[in-house]
Image: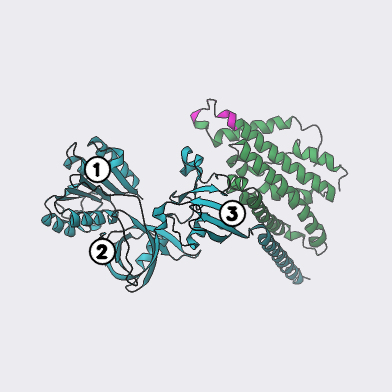
Amino acid sequence: MGFSIYLYSVLSFTGLVILLAAGLMIAERFLINYGVCKLDINAGEKPLEVVGGQTLLSSLYAGEIFIPSACGGKGSCGYCKITVTSGGGPVLPTETPYLTRKEVRSGVRLACQVKIREDIYVRIPEDFLNVKLFSSTVESILDLTHDIKEIRLKLDDSQEISQRPGQYVQIQAPSPDGPVFRAYSISSPAYEPTVVELNVRLVPGGIGSTYLHNLNVDDKVAFTGPYGDFYLNEDPSVEIICVGGGCGMAPMKNIIYSLYDRWPSRSCWLFFGCRTTEDIFYLERFKELEHRHPNFHVIYALSDQLKPEEKWDGETGFIHLAVDKYLEHGIPRQAFLCGPPLMIEAVTRVLGEKGLRPDEIFYDEF
Amino acid sequence: MSETSAWVILIAAIFTNNILLTNFLGMCSFIACSSQIKTSLGLGTAVVFVMIMTTIINYIIYHFILVPFHLGHLQFIVFIAVIAGFVQFVEMFVERFSPKLYFALGIFLPLITVNCAILGASLFMIIRNYSFMQSIGFGMGAGIGWALAIVLLAGLRQKMRYSHVPKCFEGVAIAMIVTGVLAMTFMGFAGMVSIQ
């Protein structure tokens, strides 16, 4: 008796759990089965047949249309906005924080939140239809600081990417729940169309940065791109201001090198904020560029107290103070900022005082 | 087995022995999901449905499987497994037929699994030796009582947005105080019937 009670307990509980699981599997078959639905893009431009029950974002991805999404479909970045003309169902509470009233009225939705349950009609900007999936091979890896690596990816099969400075790609990183996408700005200049270079800071526990930091030369990497709606001002008399902080250097390196390839005497400032001397990178390269192009000015600033053994003859304090110190008021300018939210906020305020309009300031926040 | 009719138990479970306001079970989703009447009504409905169904299923399992095989000691773990499985089913069902409600309830639908009022209802049914009909009455009454309490609180909290709550009492603190006042008003029903 004493032993059999345990046996009965275990057996009956196991039986019950198996029964419950079987019931749930049967329910899943009937409840989460929507059959095949039609997915129509830009009024018949590209009709797709998709299996219902998936999100619009993943269905479009399966149809080789790559909508930007920095968060990987969790509904936390708000990048995957597209217009659904019919068949999308009601706007969900998870979307409303990212949509203005005007967007809701015109049918804009977050593609990652819309589930396909019936035939659906969407409109997608031409820019997104030009986004391609690239395969590439790691050409070189360089340690820039203790936690930032420069990774150069050579596109396979002599493919070329036509990017504008300031745009980004989405790297496909493997994870236990299937591949996820992480956005990284392109740091290689636009005149090198066969290469995509990234600056990757290792984020502890981060899926994308851990994957990229563990890559070796000759490994294969897949990504989609280019994304981003930054346009460099084509008027050479407009001064370009780049302000970065932490590891927010990649898009600005692209902008600066592309700029001096086209307009060797154009005026441009680079402000970069680091914490300590250990976080400094690319300073020599930019100093060298400064020698060749007298109208290029590079300012690095350290925000932490110097340690006794460290030597530093540049600026100290937060980077917006340096911006305030060096820039004169009222020159036609375009600014590109890249860094943490607090830095963006402070620099935007300073640039506003220097006479820049909000539409002349573009930023990448992370 | 008590002789009280199922109807009396139903009424008593709503008013005199409200599972939330007299036993204080299921407080976490009660406080967290009661800022809007619409959401709380949705959650309340889901709780009523889950509570009726789980008391029925648990009654059958307890009296036809656990008791004959002398496995009464398994009731806690079995009841929790049944509730968890059933909530999963309800979740799929709601997602299919009312996506808006599904997203409005958000995290709270899976939270019903760990809503102690649901487990409490099943356990009270065993402790108080209810018959099958009495159990249905009790499950329904306890569910409706819980839903009534959360909708009442949500209504009060919606109104409260326009009143001057002292700064230090804002949010959950005032909700707890209001819950206490609600519980006291429900004590007014206490003399009607007793189902202990």
Q: Earlier in the sequence, mark 2 or mark 1?
A: 2
Q: Residues within 10 Å of mark 2 (few under 14, many from 20)?
A: some
Q: Is residue A31 visible?
A: yes
Q: Position of residue A151 (x, y in %)?
A: 30, 65
**According to the image, label 2 marks what residue?**
A192
Q: Which chain is cyan?
A: A
As shown in the figure, which amino acid type bears the numbered disc 1? His
As shown in the figure, which amino acid type bears the numbered disc 2? Glu
Are both tags, 3 and 1, on one chain? yes
Q: Which mark is residue A119?
A: 3
Question: Dividing the picture into quarters, in which one does residue A257 lie?
Answer: bottom left
The CA distance from mark 3 to mark 1 is 51 Å
As shown in the figure, which amino acid type bears the numbered disc 3? Asp
Q: Position of residue B123 (x, y in %)?
A: 74, 51
In magenta segment, residue B165: yes
Residue range in magenta is: B157-167
Q: Which mark is residue A228?
A: none
Q: Residues within 10 Å of mark 3 (few under 14, many from 20)?
A: some
Which residue is at a point 32% across and 41% down the rendered structure image? A345
The chain containing the residue under callout 3 comes to A
Chain B: drawing colour: green
Q: Which mark is residue A320?
A: 1
Which residue is at a point 71% across and 49% down the rendered structure image? B50
